[in-house]
Image: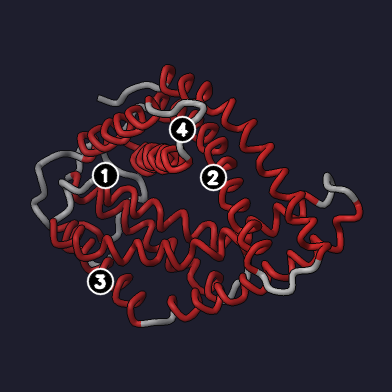
């Protein structure tokens, strides 16, 4: 940003600075990361570039959602659907990247005669990945994306100069961390071994929100609490992520098995083996999740 409060400044937050300035700074940092990764994502230079792009985008959406009261209403209403659109066009390519990695890993545990079928499935996935990449490339080169990034940048500049609510950066950070923690705890309390997939996915999103606010506002929060909670959310997020990836992969493989004309017998057999593997992992993950969630909530510190 090139104006006033968002000019040349330390990358670290200052506890006593206005909360709106800190919020604008944190969101602008994510925008700059996203813009730096754009070319790599557009040209598919590195799968990790897309992952990191999505992290910056998710952090933006998470903080904007948690800080609805601190953001001018017109900013939140105008840009929320546009960020959701970016999430949508980047989701399928990332899911397919991770599925390709999973199929590669499955080669070492599935029977040797599954190789031909796995090769065919991988080719189908790469074809889907190519189509998804073309949609992504077109989207990032289009007017809608340019309007979002330039408009969001301008909105953050206005936010940094606004009078805001009067909260300091430290007060804002505590409020956001407390809000994210409460939301996560409420959702976690509803998760049992037979919880719907949608509920588990929602808990994953709320776990990410808590982690993101602590990582982005950690400069002005108690260091020991931040470190302990971030480490806990990473472990839980990994468990929830593996569960979610497993569900997504199962659906994708099942859709190929039932929706691909001319699928060979080898590929059909390989897809059945993969689905059996996903079902086994789902059962194991469900048994562990409820216990892991309760332990995290019990041990997690508060930020009030």
Rendered image: mark on residue 240 = none
Q: On screen, 54 above or below 227? A: below
Please determine whether, in this image, residue 31 is positioned above or below residue 280.
Answer: below
Tell me if label 3 and label 2 are in contact, CB under 8 Å: no
Q: Nearer the viewer, mark 1 or mark 2?
A: 2
Given this view, does label 1 or label 3 mark the residue nearer the observer? 1
Q: Say which mark, if any, is on residue 195.
A: 4
Residue pictured at 43% horizontal, 64% vertical: 88
Name which of mark 3 and mark 4 comes first in the sequence. 3
Give the secondary structure at mark 2: helix
Along the horizontal axis of the image, is 8 left or right of 286?
A: left
**How much space separates mark 1 and mark 4, taking CA atoms?**
25 Å
Residue corresponding to mark 3 = 151
Which numbered disc, 1 or 4, marks the residue that appears first in the sequence? 1
In the rendered image, which quarter contains the C terminus?
Answer: top left
167 horizontally vs 230: left or right:
left
Cβ–Cβ under 8 Å for marks 1 and 2: no
Q: Earlier in the sequence, mark 3 or mark 2?
A: 3
- Say whether disc 1 or disc 2 marks the residue closer to the N-terminus: 1
- On residue 66, the disc is 1
The residue drawn where x is 70% and y is 55% is 101
Q: Which residue is mark 2?
A: 244
């Amino acid at each position: 940003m090139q104006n006033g409060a968002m000019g040349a400044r330390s990358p670290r937050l200052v506890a006593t600075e206005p909360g709106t300035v800190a919020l604008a700074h944190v969101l602008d940092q994510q925008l700059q990361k996203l813009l730096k990764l754009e070319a790599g994502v557009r040209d598919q230079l590195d799968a990790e570039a897309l992952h990191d792009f999505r992290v910056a985008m998710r952090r933006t959406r998470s903080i904007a959602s948690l800080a609805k009261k601190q953001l001018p209403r017109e900013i939140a209403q105008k840009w929320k659907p546009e960020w959701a659109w970016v999430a949508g066009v980047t989701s399928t390519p990332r899911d397919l990247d991770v599925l390709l990695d999973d199929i590669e890993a499955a080669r070492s545990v599935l029977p040797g005669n599954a190789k031909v079928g796995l090769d065919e499935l991988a080719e189908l996935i790469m074809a889907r990945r190519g189509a998804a990449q073309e949609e992504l490339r077109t989207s990032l080169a289009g007017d809608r994306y340019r309007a979002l990034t330039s408009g969001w940048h301008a909105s953050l500049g206005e936010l940094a100069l606004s009078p805001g609510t009067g909260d300091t950066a430290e007060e804002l950070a505590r409020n956001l961390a407390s809000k994210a923690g409460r939301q996560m705890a409420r959702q976690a309390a509803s998760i049992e071994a037979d919880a719907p997939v949608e509920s588990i996915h929602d808990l994953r999103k709320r776990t990410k929100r808590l982690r993101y606010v602590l990582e982005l506002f950690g400069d002005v929060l108690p260091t020991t609490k931040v470190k302990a909670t971030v480490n806990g959310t990473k472990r839980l997020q990994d468990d929830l992520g593996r569960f979610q990836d497993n569900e997504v992969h199962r659906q994708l493989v099942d859709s190929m098995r039932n929706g691909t004309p001319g699928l060979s017998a080898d590929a059909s057999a390989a897809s059945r083996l993969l689905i059996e593997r996903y079902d086994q992992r789902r059962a194991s993950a469900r048994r562990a999740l409820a216990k892991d969630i309760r332990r995290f909530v019990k041990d997690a510190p508060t930020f009030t």
